[in-house]
Image: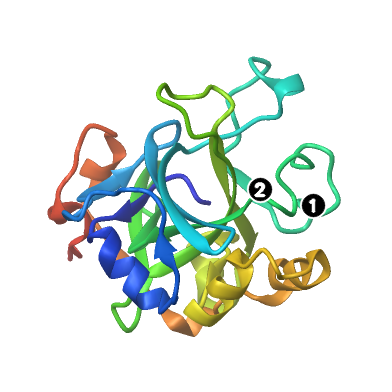
Amino acid sequence: MCGRYSIYESMDHYLRQLSLDLVVINGYDHEPINRYNVAPSTRVEIIRQVGDGLSADRVKWGWSPFWAKGKRPDPINARAETVVTGKFFKGLWPNGRALAPANGWFEWLPDPADPKRKQPYYITSVDGEPLFFAALAEVHHSLEPDERDGFVIITAAADQGLVDIHDRKPLVLSPDIAREWMDPATTPARAAEIVEAGCRPAQDFRWFPVGKAVGNVRNQGPELVEPIQ
């Protein structure tokens, strides 16, 4: 995890769930985002707190420090166990804290009848409310896309029933913790505590098999997140 996810409602919807008394300092599209199959290296919406305001930016999913550029594909995830102390993400920690809003994410399980085939599953919230993935981002506002820009989603060890789907999960934060995560006033020590123990528990999620069309990054549409028998 996490290699594909969905974000299909309007940015206004995600911002309302955060209940932040902050002004969005940049323009953003008020129409539904309609990304049912977000793939690595594509640009997708994230939310950051900048001073006393919020910034909603479309940023490439994937990031590497300058000294690692071109040596391998940009990582899309950062492990909770090493992100705080490791060298690779030192340029993003702790001041690059951001949120990747989502509606759910996908994982693939080997088919019991044929291990060479894999069945995709969709994981979403039990209550139908949006998810907020803890992320780290580098963003430079300019007229042209900046090759330094990018973000990663922090992942943690899966717990309880989620282990049956995958041994990793995105670090999904409740709205209260998500606000704290983004706040520049949150200390690095407190942010590290959120990385260690701030993820929502497995009982907050439900999961079900979906069609294999999600395996093709070109496919989009609500049918990708509909359960199948």
Q: How is the image coloured?
A: rainbow
Query: The residue under label 1 is which amino acid type?
Result: Thr
Residue sitting at x 46%, y 59%: 54
Query: The residue under label 2 is which amino acid type?
Result: Ala
Q: Which residue is mark 1?
A: 82
Graded by Cα atoms within 10 Å as few (under 14), some (14 to 19) or many (20 or more), the crowding at tag 1 reads: few
Coordinates of residue 191 in the picture (x, y in percent)? 73, 67
Residue sitting at x 71%, y 58%: 80
Coordinates of residue 105 in the picture (x, y in percent)? 39, 57
Question: Which residue of the protein is positioned furthest toward the top in this rendering?
Answer: 70
* Residue 199 visible somewhere in the drawing: no
Disc 1 + disc 2, Cβ < 8 Å: yes
Residue sitting at x 27%, y 34%: 216
Graded by Cα atoms within 10 Å as few (under 14), some (14 to 19) or many (20 or more), the crowding at tag 2 reads: many
Coordinates of residue 119 in the picture (x, y in percent)? 33, 51
* Residue 25 falls left or right of residue 138: left
* Residue 94 falls left or right of residue 25: right
Q: Which residue is mark 2?
A: 78
